[in-house]
Image (cartoon, grey):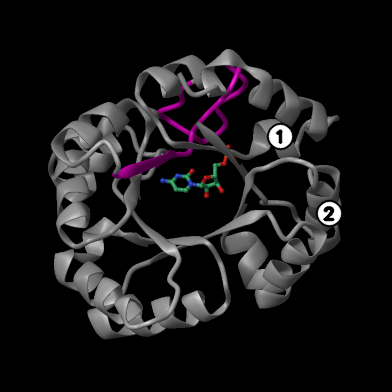
Amino acid sequence: MELCVALDKPEMEQTLALARELREFDIWMKVGFRSFIRDGRNLIDELKAINPGFKIFLDLKLYDIPNTMADAAEEIAKMGVDMFNVHASSGEKAMKTVMQRLGGLDRRPLVLAVTALTSFDNESFGYIYNENIAQKADRFAKDSFDAGLDGVVCSAFESASIKNITSENFLTLTPGIRPFGEDAGDQARVADLAVAKSEEVDIIVVGRPIYKADNPKAVVEKILGDSSMQTA
Ligand code: C5P
């Protein structure tokens, strides 16, 4: 499993200080709404300057009409990020249009689709989608796979089932990870490292347990050193 650190700090300088502290690790850096709305492309360039080996995941969860999504995807690809995401609920047509557009470029980032946000429980999810999370997540994953995407964002609990109905090479990236059982915060479906491993997760996303820790570097070291992170 690989580790992706969510950079949801309140100021750019704090984000960069965290990145400098973690510069020696082979990890993903997740730039989400908070950081990107505030700091924009400059942040991506600064992160790559700190460690060109950082893999950048731009977590903007695109959701719009197909042409607008494809336009946005093309601009994201030009920024040189390594991975970004869309909402699977934007529909198979929108996802296909994104992949067609990216297919015309020399180099494209990995593209993932969000199935169900990990902050949903079954009741709050059902209110919007009229279906239970596990079934709908499987269906969204199948749509994303058929549209040619590289994988999905899901909870650890859906990962193995999704690989089963798509392909073992179809990536699963899972937020809501509390590596050693830390406080869940607003996440409803949290899993620890052992669950993530048993569910065949490819990339775990960890935010608050790292960036709010007194010693983020020690937490990252502990996570990367855990036996669940090693490939069998
Ligand atoms: O602090 P925590 O570890 O809960 O952070 C999880 C990160 O993953 C946040 O940046 C959140 O926006 C993001 N995320 C999520 N659920 C998704 C997709 C992204 O929690 N389905």
- Residue at 26%, 57% (x, y): give it: 88
Determine if the magenta segment contains residue 176.
yes
Q: In this view of the protein, can residue 59 be seen by the observer? A: no
Where residue 16 sits: x, y (%)? 82, 57
Q: Give the number of the disc on residue 14.
A: 2
In the rendered image, the vertical position of residue 5 relative to residue 100, given as above or below: above
- 66 vs 13, left or right, is left
In the rendered structure, which amino acid carries the disc numbered 2?
A: Gln
Where residue 70 sits: x, y (%)? 33, 80
Where residue 184 sits: x, y (%)? 55, 27
> Which quadrant does the C terminus fall into?
top left
In the rendered structure, which amino acid carries the disc numbered 1?
A: Ile
Query: Please, what secondary structure does the residue beneath circle 2 have?
Result: helix
In the figure, residue 159 lies in which quadrant? Answer: top left
Determine if the magenta segment contains residue 90.
no
Between 104 and 117, which is closer to the camera in this rendering? Answer: 104
Q: Which residue is mark 1?
A: 210
In the rendered image, the vertical position of residue 42 relative to residue 109, given as above or below: below
Q: Report the Cα–Cα distance between label 2 and label 1.
A: 13 Å
Contact between labelled residues 1 and 2, with CB atoms less than 8 Å apart: no
